[in-house]
Amino acid sequence: MNELFKPDLVKIVDAFNTKGDCLSYMADLLSASGCLSFPDRYLAAVRGREEIMSTGIGRGIAIPHARDLTVFTLRIAVCRLRKPLDFQAVDDLPVNLVFMIAVPQSTNHEYMSILRTLSEYLRQDENRMVLLSADTDKELYEIVHELEDTISAVPHN
């Protein structure tokens, strides 16, 4: 498996005005990392998914994601928000951790396994607290890089 998280995809952000601003920012990060070719098309796929049902899974977490032909490599962008954002989450609580997954069209089992593992990891209070305690992008990256080991340890079939 290639690297899911890269340092330039892991950011601590003060605030976003809207959910749309957050999604655009994260799609731009993914595009700049070279894992997708048309950020507008990818972003449209993510927004379409959000319109069907919010990816705010509760407990301050959102995992927006989309499978699209414009994505070359499975990659995850991470934002920790200093000011929580209304994401229309299932528990109606604002989110402060957003994991955006860019998924190649050809990837299915691996992606579903990663989504499940990530959700299970983030549902544990102690794991969220560690992520929320990071003060710098570098610290946050070091934490999610360890999370990648957890994800990689799960069989993807």
Image: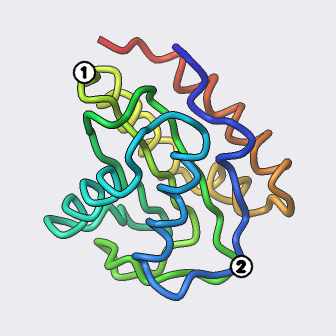
Residue picked out by circle 1: 106
Within the image, what quadrant is residue 91 found in? bottom left
Relative to 119, is 3 above or below?
above
Which residue lies most toward the front here? 38
Which residue lies most toward the left here? 52
How far across and how far down the image is residue 120, in percent? 43, 42
- Residue at 81% x, 58% y is 134
How far across and how far down the image is residue 51, in percent? 18, 70
Relative to 135, is 92 above or below?
below
Q: CA–CA distance between discs 1 and 2?
A: 35 Å
Q: How many marks?
A: 2
SS at circle 2:
loop
SS at circle 1:
loop
Residue picked out by circle 2: 14
Q: Earlier in the sequence, mark 1 or mark 2?
A: 2
Residue 122 horizontal side relative to residue 81, left or right: left
